[in-house]
Image: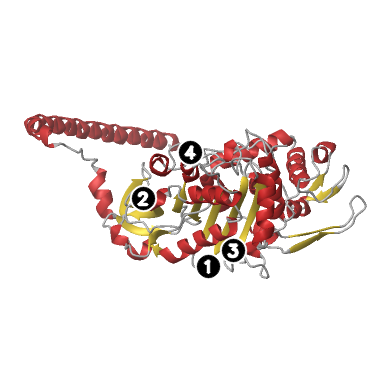
Amino acid sequence: MKKTSVFRQIFKEIHKRRCRRLPAAVLSGALLLGLAGAGSFFSPAATVQASPVENEETNPDGSGDAAVSGEELTPEEQLQQELDQVYAMEVQSNGWEAWPAGPGTYGEAAIVMEVGTGTILYAKNIDAHHYPASITKLVTTLAALKNGNLQDPVTFSHNSVSFLKWDEASIGMKEGNQLTLEQALYATLLASANEAAYAVGESVGVNAGHDYNWFIQQMNEICRELGGTNSNFVNTNGLHDPNHYTCARDMALIGRELFQYPDFFRIAQTPQYTIPASATTEEHVFQQHHEMLLPDNSDYYPYAIGGKTGYTSDALSTLVTMADNGSMQLVCVVLKTHGINVYPDTRNLLEYAFQNFQKVSIAEQETSEDVEEILPDETAGYVVLPMEASFSDLSMELVPDGGLSTEAQLNYTYHGQPVGSARASLSDHYIKEHSAQPKDVSHKDQETETEDSGISDLQGKVILGAAVALLLILITALIRITRKRKQKTRRRRR
């Protein structure tokens, strides 16, 4: 086994046991055991590239200042260098015009999305492919809630239990065991049980007249329907597969959709759950793993209301967290987090969003003469703005429904960033102005337009005259037909 692999196993155990407050000497000893003479902390796939400036000025050959002096970095120094490089990665939203600057993260990708509008408040490499690990189980849960019923049977087949390795999350289910879908989702979300996630997909597929592969297709279709374009799911549990990947934006869209399912939050918020013994299954007790949901945990966050943890040696730490402070609902996703920073990063991102953004009612602020009324609709009906911004700073695009409809979609942007939308009824002013469907004429066409106006007027008069004549002929014919019918009726009566 490579020494880097040894360290990965050590780090994995530290991560699992939540030993973030180990004495420095113990942690250093573990680092030295795993890294002495091993080179980089991460595998080649996980190596973080320094920025061009760092490469040229401080790290020309990728080996750091120690290479210049001929000294090797200690394991602690290597770890810190990797962390610094990840933290220094570009945050794209910090480059948006008039947008509040957000914090760095020790994750290679991160996003904060407002739930009602879908507004992206923070963006760091949100479309880059990363391995999701067990946050995959959120997609599994969503597909199960859409395609199954909580009291449906979930049967554990040979396939659902035979793939497990000794160090993979499990609650010890055996072939032939049977749960309800609700119980299996508790095991999937709280215990992160890999065999439960497999059985959920397989059983929901079978109950729908299909199979496990059909359920996987449903997971991918749901993601695409929600607007996801950078994901490919090949299993229900997130165990590593090079073809199983996602991105921060897509996972935020999944998390946003889960707000439509109260059963998800009821399950995800449970601190401990017991599956009682039955004729086919022994009793199982398991606990919540998302530390921001546990009041007695040092990482507890009072606004957190749901989410899912994830970790593999390839994905590193991943985390999805839903939060609600009473005035705004958020989804935060962090991917490929280095070190034990997944909870502090998430807290910092959520606090950044809650403190720097506000919801503004469109109905109370929209004064366009084209809009008669903001309509109650499934769209949020508000925009999300930086605290320092006002509604007058927005640009509004009015998209009429077309045809005979007098309604339209209003889409709002702030310096090019989408911040919300609403449905509206159109004003009489707009309807009258657009009923004649006027042409937009450029300056260079104005002269030609003037020359042709006389011909156009004459053609219009001819067409109008012909239409009137045709109408008179039709009326006359209608009168004659009516008279003849009346005469026939009178003759019959005689």
Q: Measure the C-alpha gap from mark 2 to mark 3.
A: 28 Å
SS label for mark 3: strand
Residue 378 percent location from the top left of the image: 49, 55
**Residue positioned 61% across, 39% down in the render:** 43
Residue type, mark 1 in image: Asn
**Residue positioned 53% across, 67% down in the render:** 325
Residue type, mark 4 in image: Gly
- On residue 325, which mark appears? 1
Q: Which residue is mark 3?
A: 304
Name the residue nearer the viewer: 401 or 324. 324
In this view, the mark in front (4 or 2) = 4
Say which quarter of the image contains residue 276.
bottom right
Q: Which residue is mark 2?
A: 95
Q: Measure the C-alpha gap from mark 4 to mark 2.
A: 27 Å
> Residues at badges 4 and 1 in contact (C-beta under 8 Å)?
no
Residue type, mark 2 in image: Gly
